[in-house]
Amino acid sequence: GSCGMMVNNKPKLACKTFLRDYSGHMRIEPLANFPIERDLVVDLSHFIESLEAIKPYIIGNEAPALDGKPHPSKELQVSRTKQTPAQLEKYRQFSMCINCGLCYAACPQFGLNPEFLGPAAITMAHRYNLDNRDHGKAKRMSLLNGKNGVWSCTFVGYCSEVCPKHVDPASAINQGKVE
């Protein structure tokens, strides 16, 4: 996902874009809405900070302690990590994000407000909020409901159109608004 760039004014992955699919001239530019470092290289610092802020990992799934010692039960260990296919299906689509940044290049709100968490970070938060093994939803929701969270999205939906993995960040953002 590190080869994102604008191809004829559309966010694309260079590694999946072929010259044979274009006739005439082709215009290659750095990813839109990001500060340009040099040539086609953009500064992804805010993108990475947004991802880190939403804590994209399972939080607080430790077995209960017995007298300050870890729980010895193997069954409890398995129940903390085991999922049914139905539980996995709740968030599977949102876990396919490759962090390429194309959704940020497509997002007019991120272009206007660079402090907006953005589609990928909100999608990743939604993914972990839907995971039955996670206990960090309250921490994430305070960030998602904040000034630069889900309510900043004007729901253009272009982020979902350009996603090379068909993740549908627009859906994750809207679902985050009803949580």
Image (cartoon, rainbow, N blue to C red):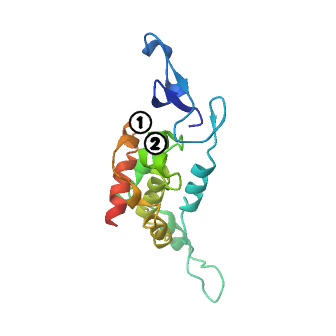
Which amino acid type corresponds to the residue marked 1 in the rendered image? Answer: Val
Residue receiving disc 2: 103
Figure check: 20 above or below 101? above
Alpha carbon separation for disc pair 1 and 2: 6 Å
**Picture quarter with the N terminus:** top right
> Residue 103's spot in the image, x, y percent?
46, 42
In the displayed image of the protein, which residue is found farthest to the bottom? 67
> Residue 84's spot in the image, x, y percent?
39, 59
In the displayed image of the protein, which residue is found farthest to the right? 38
Q: Secondary structure at mark 1?
A: helix
**Picture quarter with the C terminus:** bottom left
For label 1, the crowd category at 10 Å Cα-Cα, with few meaning under 14, some 14 to 19 and many 20 or more, is many
Residue in view at x 61 percent, y 45 percent: 44
Residue in view at x 63 percent, y 89 percent: 67
Residue receiving disc 1: 162
In the displayed image of the protein, which residue is found farthest to the left? 178
Residue in view at x 45 percent, y 61 percent: 149
In this rendering, the count of numbered labels is 2
Figure check: 23 above or below 71? above
Nearer-the-camera pick, 173 or 60: 173
Which amino acid type corresponds to the residue marked 2 in the rendered image? Answer: Cys
Q: Secondary structure at mark 2?
A: helix
Figure check: 15 above or below 37? above
For label 2, the crowd category at 10 Å Cα-Cα, with few meaning under 14, some 14 to 19 and many 20 or more, is many
> Residue 46's spot in the image, x, y percent?
59, 51
Question: In this orientation, does residue 90 appear?
Answer: no
- Is the Cβ of the residue at disc 1 closer than 8 Å to that at disc 2? yes
Nearer-the-camera pick, 153 or 141: 153
Q: Between disc 1 and disc 2, whose residue precedes?
A: 2
Nearer-the-camera pick, 58 or 101: 101
Location of residue 60 by image quarter: bottom right
